[in-house]
Amino acid sequence: MSAAVVPAALHLLLFPQAAPPSGGAEGPLTGDALPVPVALDNAFWFRAGVDYLAVEDPSHAEGTAQAVALARTCFDRRFGVAPLAGAVMATGLAGLFEELPLERQGWVLPWRFNRSEPETPEAHASSLRHELGHTFLLNTLLPNLRKGQYGGDAPDWLDEAAGVAMESTASRDDRRRRFGALVADGRLTPFTRFVVQAHPVFASQRLQTEIARARAAASNQAIVLEFTLSELGVTGSSPDDFYAQTGAVIDFLDTLGDAGLLGRISRDIADSGEAAGWLERLGPDVGLPRPDDWDEAFAAWSTRAPPTATAGRDCDGEPETGEA
């Protein structure tokens, strides 16, 4: 989903069920953010590090390559695993995915470069990185193995955390300010309830019906669906609040002194098949052995949560050298 707040238009990517991922991407080539034209089929193809781009307008290549390279670095830092090699492809070209070398087919992100809603290049890049975060999580740590669904087997907060963590500081600060207002209004969801809560948008019955219909029509390929929130019957502030609290959970986890905690949580969920068992299994390592401890610590932190970025934590910031 896109950057600062929930957009009026919802951009969903549905992926077929996948086998568990194996191996990682080869080491990055030099100049990851400098796209190199390559000859594949008759589209505008570029190589960007280990990844490929297929665009209808070659002017889109450089900004896209930069976004992919930054998202790769951020995901590896946050989740402790290098994403597989894959491709960002204009939606009209996604059918050319099989033209890629087999070892570069770890994932595909169909992307609409000419968006209907106006946005700056920076906001567009942040939106793209958000969707790459979803894609990387799905194809490295938590694929869709257990049931027909949007995304993979990650609980909704973690699926969105993979996206939100890739966003720009400007986007994340918007979410931080909204979280402060949420707390001030008494709308904070207890931590242990939030980490098993359904995304308000994905709880829409209309959306679930459309997802099921799309999967039945094209079960073996990636699909792009777009709706307005009003078409899905989603109103009120709950979607914005969900993103704001997701961003706050990322910031809270950063204070616990384990830079790879999101990755450890993901692996625990993948290994156990349990959405929240990590609270008790990983909690002792960060001084929170009981589920109630998570609720109390998060509530206390929320009252003093900073309204803007902590240096080096966001995707477009310089990494910190010490622990929180």
Image: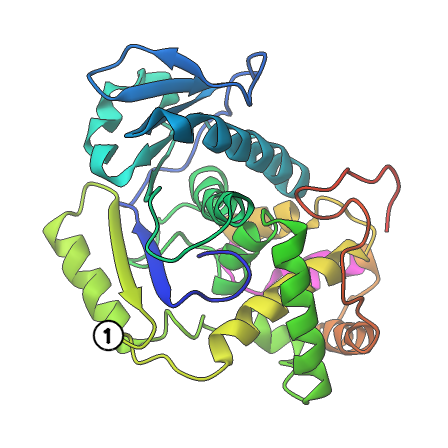
Measured as percent of width and height from the top left, residue 201 is found at: 39, 71
Q: Nearer the viewer, residue 12 or 5?
A: 5
Please rate how many residues cluster around mark 1, counting C-alpha atoms within 10 Å: few if below 14, some from 14 to 19, many from 20.
some
Residue 131 counted in the magenta span: no
Residue 257, compared with residue 289, is above or below; it is above
Q: Confirm whether residue 251 shows in the render.
A: yes
Does residue 161 sit above or below 321 in this rendering?
below
Magenta extent? 271-284
Residue at 15% over, 61% down = 213
Number of residue marks: 1
Tag 1: amino acid? Arg
**Residue 16, horizontal then vertical, whole percent:** 26, 45
Classified by dominant secondary structure, the portion drawn in magenta counts as helix
292 vs 171, left or right, is right
Please name the residue that numbered disc 1 is placed on. Answer: 206
Residue 268 location (% of width, % of height): 58, 51
* Residue 261 pos. (x, y %): 70, 50
Q: Is 281 one of the magenta-colored residues?
A: yes
Residue toward you, 174 or 157: 174
